[in-house]
Image: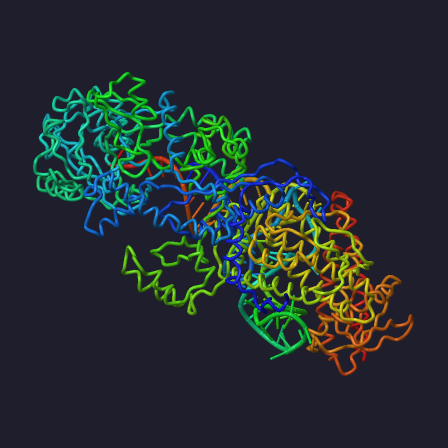
RNA sequence: AGGCGCGUAGCUCAGUUGGUUAGAGCGCUACCUUGACAUGGUAGAGGUCGUUGGUUCGAUUCCAAUCGCGCCUACCA
């Protein structure tokens, strides 16, 4: 079998194959393991009957995998595999989101390429077309998730638009409506003039942009002067209904109640007083009020309706000046033609220019200042959002928010890291009603019907509505054209995917789920809304913990974006990609083609040879290692390369073990479940006892780390144990035992047994983070280690076995290591080839030293490459030598020819310098009565001990230095 | 304006009740094709822990201020 293991680990050869096997065998389905099978090498049993569940944050069907997914899913899969191995009945629920606006835009773009719009097709055909498209490419993202090794329960994959989830959406809508928690109303909303739909507050992103502040003169009707108003949006003058001043402002107080001539319109508008909105210090202290196109002005209008309405020409006080495209509309019908004909049909920005020009011509423009302002844009379209007056559906949020806040306050839901709860509270306590209707076609149609008289009927279906309200079959009613915000269905995800409103077994087993793993960017969009809906409809939290991770950025800390050309595709890191395709990929379909050249140059510079293939396991290990709590991740190519090397290290360690163990006597009987007692006599060496002890501590560390969401610590513990202890020391220490005629068969059996079993444990310990390589190796190793089982996935996760923790062995081994390191150090610093055997003399030895030297002589000889080791008899003169200390024992390597005297003097001086610094520091500390009196006794004792050791070592080296100098 | 977070080796990051000479990986230097692995081995250089104060016997760690960076929320027309 060993000959089938290539010298270098090749992830391609195994990854897809194993994933297919796992999926085909149904290993991802929840099953749980009874307590009959205990944990090998731990003796503890898995708790029976506990379930563990994570809901995947459903990716958009339009989507393709990005680094955020890679990170997010690595964490979830690690947790899922960990709990599955622990024996929990474990479900990772897969699915995808219909992503209303995003998906509709993709298909509209396709239509656009054919020179058509969705209106050419009509609603029904357009939706058909989207379903078609979903059928073609909806599997894209799920296949990419498979590439990551994600052990999702695919047999129960859900989609937010499938029948079951659509039922859940209707049910929730109807129930909330019947409780008065959903209502319809006409108010200002965020209107996207490009997409022709309302969007929620969250879907609006404001960014600072350069603009101007126009100062415009509004003459008083009585001819007694003018007011100057300052605005960033002069075109909205056409919809002005008043000018507000602060009632405490001496400059204008006497004018309150007067009328102004609104330029260009021939209208008169009142001067009103509003203390809340008007800051006398800002601008001119006069604010034009355009209630139909500004949220603050709308609020002012609500406070001053009567005063504004008395103005003879204004009826109701609200003048909508825009079409759904944000062009100036003709309002002849509704408001009696208050908008001058000259502007009608102009786009808002054209109208702005025209208004400014006309004011200028009329001498009514005082000045234009440069001004920075926050411009609201739609997160999908990028269009400047317009406050716009329309009929929409809303969720009354306060009654839902209250219990959702309490759930976190009470600790029913915990955020990890904890501080995210502050962000959550901040938002939940200031939350506004949620606008849930969207004027698009792709999504859940609002279950409301209207008759010709404008009556609204809400129900699960048209039949239900007719029945409930006694409407005859021929009574004409029609369903609301709008669809629901995508996040409305996402909010139900934790229970709708489990079968709600049916009372299913899955719902019983897995709700509430255990943890939600997500980036902070969707705490508001999604997390908060799931909590509200879960509490409302399941009467319990949707998850007990929320693990919030950071964003994946490039190695400089920049956000990855197409326009920066710094996007890494996880699949490219797994498979590798040549330079040319990478350049092509990064520069294709740019929004700003002028950037392409720069991106190409940068890419050629950063990846002159393209990206090598690292494999999924290396990528996952990198994500785990970088998963520090609550911090963004700077993705560093150096790290993934290092972890690819780590895979190779593990692979080659296995090759070594197999080479020494296959066909040999290991004192292991036939494969069975769980470890068996040795079937022949074994004798465990110091190295065996030591590595077993270290393994136990590593298991403990990894368990603690994963349970505490410290995947970085888990990865580090595994890495260090594997590389620095198992490979660097233990495998080397096994060589003199296995290759010597002087060691006994029992000794060899003990070592072989330990080699294979530690490896087998290590594989299980590593499996949640690196599923593929561990499965591949485990399949070879397990039978030899005496372990049966179809897959490592369903093996017990290792936990610490106290009886194998061995502090004495660790101490004794520390002595061996120090011995070897001392000699290596001398060789290194003396430029003696590491392989060159040197004679070694020991002075100042204790009984233990002498015992251990005899006992562990094979280790010392082999790893330190000694020619001879002799204990210098008491009283004998020490030859001129290079020196290292092991405790108080002196290791001497005689100078004869090998070693340069001056170099050794320098070495010693350096060591002495270090030591005397230490002695001074600790001495000073202990001389300080404050320290000795006030510090805990244990700390003081520890310092005393350190001082004694350091002083002895120092004296030792000083004597040595003198000796060498004299020679 | 309010809130949160970050600043530790050239780079990417650990450092969890304040107490070893502050650690790891990558990079760097020197040496080594040793029978698992050059995607390797051995040895080494490199840090006044952003700055200034304070608490303390003792501060990278706690407190205050300050500088720099990032994010989020709300905004003045």
User: In the image as oriented, which residue stretches furthest toward the top?
Assistant: A470
Viewer-side residue, A636 vs A430: A636
* Side of A874 where A137 appears, left or right: left
Give how far across and how far down residue A436 sits, in percent. Answer: 33, 32
Give how far across and how far down residue A597 sits, in percent: 31, 64
In the picture, measured across the screen, residue A956 lies left or right of residue A262, that is right
Q: Quick one: A613 or A334, which is closer to the camera?
A: A613
Q: Quadrant of the C terminus of chain A?
A: bottom right
Q: Quadrant of residue A721?
A: bottom right
Write down the quadrant of residue A882 in the picture.
bottom right
Numbered circles on residues, count: 0
Name of the residue lying farthest toward the bottom: A897
Give above or below for A39 relative to A596. Answer: above
Nearer the observer, A65 or A773: A773
Q: Is residue A76 left or right of residue A116?
A: right
Does residue A186 sit above or below A834 in this rendering? Answer: above
Q: Quadrant of the N terminus of chain A?
A: bottom right
Residue A575 image offset from top left, x and y in percent: 46, 61
In this figure, which colouring scheme has been used for the structure? rainbow
Give how far across and how far down residue A52 sits, in percent: 56, 38
The front one of A671 and A553 is A671
Inspect this view and state whether residue A191 appears: yes
Q: Please say whether residue A282 is visible from this viewpoint.
A: no
Relative to A952, say whether B56 is above or below: above
């Amino acid at each position: 079998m060993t000959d089938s293991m290539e010298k270098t680990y090749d992830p391609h050869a195994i990854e897809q194959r194993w994933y297919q096997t796992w999926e085909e065998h149904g290993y991802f389905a929840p099953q749980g393991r009874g307590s009959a099978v205990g944990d090998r090498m731990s003796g503890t049993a898995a708790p029976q009957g506990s379930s563990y569940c994570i809901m995947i944050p459903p990716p958009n069907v339009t989507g393709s995998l990005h680094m955020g997914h890679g990170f997010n899913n690595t964490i979830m899969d690690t947790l899922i595999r960990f709990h599955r191995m622990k024996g929990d009945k474990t479900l990772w629920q897969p699915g995808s989101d219909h992503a209303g606006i995003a998906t509709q835009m993709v298909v509209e773009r396709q239509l656009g390429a054919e020179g058509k719009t969705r209106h050419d097709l009509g609603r029904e055909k357009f939706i058909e077309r989207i379903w078609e498209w979903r059928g073609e490419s909806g599997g894209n993202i799920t296949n990419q998730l498979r590439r990551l090794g994600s052990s999702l329960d695919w047999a129960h994959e859900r989609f937010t638009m499938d029948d079951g989830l659509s039922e859940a959406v209707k049910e929730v809508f109807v129930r909330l409506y019947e409780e008065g928690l959903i209502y319809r109303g006409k108010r200002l909303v965020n209107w996207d003039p490009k997409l022709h739909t309302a969007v929620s507050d969250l879907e609006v992103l404001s960014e600072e942009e350069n603009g101007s502040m126009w100062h415009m003169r509004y003459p008083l009707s009585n001819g007694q002067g003018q007011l100057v108003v300052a605005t960033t949006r002069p075109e909205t003058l056409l919809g002005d209904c008043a000018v507000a001043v602060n009632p405490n402002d001496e400059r204008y107080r006497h004018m309150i109640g007067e009328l102004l001539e609104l330029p260009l319109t021939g209208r008169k508008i009142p001067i009103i007083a509003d203390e809340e909105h008007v800051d006398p210090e800002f601008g001119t202290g006069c604010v034009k009020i355009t209630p139909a196109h500004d949220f603050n002005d709308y609020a002012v209008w609500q406070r001053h309706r009567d005063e504004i309405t008395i103005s003879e020409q204004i009826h109701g006080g609200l003048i909508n000046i825009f079409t759904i495209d944000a062009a100036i509309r003709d309002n002849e019908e509704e408001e009696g033609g208050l908008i001058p004909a000259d502007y009608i049909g102009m786009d808002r920005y054209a109208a702005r220019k025209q208004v400014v020009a006309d004011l200028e011509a009329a001498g009514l423009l005082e000045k234009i200042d440069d001004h920075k302002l926050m411009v609201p844009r739609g997160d999908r379209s990028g269009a400047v959002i317009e406050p716009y007056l329309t009929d929409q559906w809303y969720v009354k949020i306060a009654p839902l928010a209250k219990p959702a806040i309490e759930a976190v306050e009470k600790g029913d839901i915990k955020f990890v890291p904890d501080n995210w709860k502050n962000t959550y509270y901040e938002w939940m306590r200031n939350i506004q009603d949620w606008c849930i209707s969207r004027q698009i076609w792709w999504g859940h149609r609002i279950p409301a019907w209207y008759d010709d008289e404008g009556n609204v009927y809400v129900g699960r279906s048209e039949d239900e509505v007719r029945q409930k309200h006694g409407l005859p079959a021929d009574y004409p009613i029609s369903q609301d054209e709008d669809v629901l915000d995508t996040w409305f269905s996402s909010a139900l995800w934790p229970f709708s995917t489990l079968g709600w409103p049916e009372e299913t077994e899955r719902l019983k087993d897995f709700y509430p789920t255990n943890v939600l793993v997500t980036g902070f960017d969707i705490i508001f969009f999604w997390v908060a809304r799931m909590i509200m809906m879960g509490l409302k409809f399941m009467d319990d939290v949707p998850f007990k913990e929320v693990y919030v991770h950071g964003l994946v950025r490039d190695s400089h800390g920049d956000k990855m974006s197409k326009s920066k050309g710094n996007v890494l595709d996880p699949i490219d890191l797994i498979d590798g990609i040549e330079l040319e395709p990478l350049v092509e990929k990064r520069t294709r379909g740019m929004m700003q083609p002028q950037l392409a050249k720069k991106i190409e140059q940068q890419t050629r510079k950063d990846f002159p040879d393209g990206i090598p293939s690292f494999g999924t396991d290396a990528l996952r290990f990198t994500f785990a290692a970088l998963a520090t709590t609550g911090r963004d991740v700077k993705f560093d190519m150096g790290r993934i390369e290092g972890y690819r090397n780590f895979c190779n290290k593990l692979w080659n360690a296995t090759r070594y073990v197999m080479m020494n163990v296959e066909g040999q006597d290991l004192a292991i009987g036939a494969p069975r479940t769980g470890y068996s007692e040795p079937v022949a006599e074994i004798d465990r060496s110091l190295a065996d006892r030591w590595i077993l002890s270290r393994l136990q501590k590593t298991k403990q560390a990894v368990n603690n780390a994963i349970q505490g969401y410290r995947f970085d610590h888990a990865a580090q513990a595994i890495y260090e144990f594997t590389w620095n202890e198992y490979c660097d020391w233990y495998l080397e220490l096994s060589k003199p035992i296995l290759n010597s005629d002087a060691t006994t068969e029992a000794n060899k059996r003990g070592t072989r047994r330990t080699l294979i079993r530690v490896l087998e444990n290590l594989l299980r310990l590593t499996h949640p983070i690196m599923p593929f390589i561990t499965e591949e190796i485990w399949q070879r190793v397990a039978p030899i280690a005496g372990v049966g089982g179809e897959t490592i996935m369903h093996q017990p996760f290792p936990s610490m076995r106290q009886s194998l923790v061995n502090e004495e062995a660790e101490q004794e081994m520390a002595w061996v290591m120090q011995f070897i390191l001392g000699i290596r150090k001398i060789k290194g610093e003396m430029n003696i080839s590491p392989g060159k055997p040197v004679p070694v003399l020991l002075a100042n030895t204790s009984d233990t030293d002498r015992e251990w030297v005899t006992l562990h002589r094979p280790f010392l000889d082999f790893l330190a490459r000694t020619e001879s080791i002799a204990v210098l008899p008491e009283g004998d003169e020490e030859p001129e030598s290079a020196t290292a200390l092991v405790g108080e024992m002196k290791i001497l390597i005689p100078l004869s020819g090998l070693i340069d005297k001056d170099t050794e003097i320098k070495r010693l001086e350096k060591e002495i310098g270090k030591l005397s610094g230490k002695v001074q520091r600790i001495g000073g500390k202990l001389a300080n009565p404050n320290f000795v009196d006030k510090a805990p006794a244990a700390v003081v004792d520890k310092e005393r001990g350190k001082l004694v050791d350091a002083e002895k070592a120092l004296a030792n080296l000083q004597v040595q230095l003198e000796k060498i100098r004299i020679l």
